[in-house]
Amino acid sequence: MVNQGQWNKPLPTVTGETLKFWNAARKGYLLIQHCKSCGYQWYPRGFCSGCWSKDIQYVEAKGTGKVWTYTITYQNRTPGFNEEVPYVLALVELDEGVKLFTNIINCDPKIVTIGMDVKVTFIQATNQIHIPMFEPL
Amino acid sequence: MTDLRKSAAIVGAYEHPVRYAPDKSEALIMAESIIGALADAGLEKNDVDAIFSAGGLSGYNLVDYLNMQPKYADFTSVGGASFEFHLSHAVTAIAAGRINCAVIVYASTPRVTGTLVGTGGFARNGATAADSVPGSFEDLYGKTTVGLYAMIARRHMYLYGTTSEQLAEVAVTMRKHAGLNPNALFRDPLTVEDVLASRVISDPLHLNDCCIISDGGGAVVVASPEIARNCKTKPAWVLGMAEAIAHQGAGKRDLINIAAAQTGPPAMGMAGVTHKDLDMAMIYDSFTITVVETLEDLGFCKKGEGGDFVSGGRIGLGGELPLNPDGGGLSSNHPGMRGMFLLIEATRQLRGDFTGTPRQVANCNLVLAHGTGGALGDRHSGGTIILGGD
């Protein structure tokens, strides 16, 4: 399971393009982006990847969704993950319709199923970085 | 579009027999593979005017090492399908008259270096910080190559009732074929029960659902019809080709549909062939689920019926659609980017190199090869090639 405050896994690289996302994450909000023509997009970009317009807005996601698919990982030799197996790597489909990579935490990996309702929670990795993960609703 | 059928042919093919290479560099395995493929064709260094490669050395280091002066170079690197992309690009360059004879080459030695190809995760390539995009939204969660394929296997099971036993049929068939290939790394018989009893790497994929890790390399020589007519070998003509990159589509793509759905129809359309015309297929078997998904999306069966399709001996030698008579990546060799070996075995089957042995597909005159690179669960490449005999 994920141990808060003992983050020894990869950290995100924050740039001007994604600063707003990570600032919101630190405050406990999950942001996604919306284009008037193309709808929602994930992951954050400095433009809409659908129509290549620069007119893209950050909006707060509801923070709930369903497990689209998952795997219980028993082997990953990357330090940080190696100590945490078995863990659940999942694609969660947000209520807004975009799928994102995440971990399902705060539950026994064996109870995770496709279609399971989940909600976002944030794990503090550093003072600056809080990482969105999901747990059973 | 210009009709490119029979604009070029594979005239030489060489699979390096090495599976563990502590005394060879990747560069030397590549050089030996090129020399082998040229000897096979009856051609020489001076006949070659183009080079295509991925993995191993950087392009300019490779050309330096080989001490050649290519007038055309292409180091497109899209994982395991790179060499199907290369072949398609080489045919186009030959048809345009820019080159006459190209070598496509590959080697890698992950077994010697102990590279954790499928389970190394983020640190596999020595990375220390996630890329700002998309890595910062993915690498924090412990993606592995096996895990990404496992997620697609899990979704396939959920949607279509595909079973672990059906996936195991692919591994069992490949092992049976490997028993006919003296160079294959693993040749001992394997049963469905063995696969299910092997340890789970990333649920639902077991160890034996995963390709092996070997060293290895190979090369093919691609040439114009004029050169092909004067080679020692019977040409394997390129009749159809297509390439695609499938990705997350801003989070909205249905990842159960893979690149093969984008490449199969145009490649077969270009060749003017249908599924029942094909005598065999070389299907990239990084994992058992890869084969099931690829067969479905190439249209050999309906979506969701791949589990049934791979069962009952259909994909074995003597079956309706023999796959990977060399034993595939699941048993023969998998240095990391296996697409090269699909082209080599397809060529050799079309020439009848194994005639008189059980490895030879009878009356083999039309082969489909489909390479997959990257991972089905996030983003991947797909390249389909249709090859025909002389």
Image: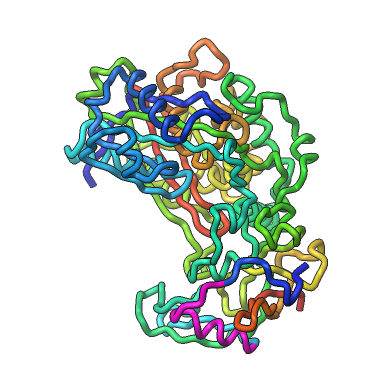
Q: Quadrant of residue B60?
A: top left
Q: Say if the magenta span includes residue B191.
A: no
Q: Is residue B320 at all visible to an observer of this figure?
A: no
Q: Quadrant of the C terminus of chain A?
A: bottom right
- Classify A9 as above or below B93: below
* Residue B106 at x, y percent in the picture: 43, 36
Membership of A25 in magenta stretch: yes
The quarter of the picture where residue A23 lies is bottom right
Residue B244 is left or right of residue B164, and the answer is left
Is A79 displayed left or right of B298 in the figure?
right
Q: Which residue is rendered at x = 46% and y = 19% of the image?
A: B363
Q: Range of the magenta residues? A: A12-27
- Colour mode? rainbow
- The outermost residue toward the front is B23
Q: Position of residue B320 (x, y in %)?
A: 56, 29
Residue at image coords 58%, 52%: B124
Q: Can the viewer see residue B232?
A: yes
Quadrant that contains the N terminus of chain A: bottom right
Pick whichever, A49 or B167, lies toward us.
A49
**B151 to A65, vertically: above or below:** above
Give the residue at the far bottom of this rendering.
A27
Q: What is the tally of numbered marks visible in this picture?
A: 0
- Closer to the camera, B269 or B98? B98
Residue placed at 49% from the left, 38% from the top?
Answer: B108
Q: Is residue A109 above or below residue B119?
A: below
Q: Looking at this rendering, what residue extends furthest in the left direction? A: B97
Answer above or below: position of B374 versus A36: above
Q: How far across and how far down the image is residue B120, in percent?
A: 62, 52
Looking at the picture, how far across and down is residue B376, in whole percent? Answer: 55, 54
Query: What residue is shown at x 40% (from left), y 19% (from top)?
Result: B351
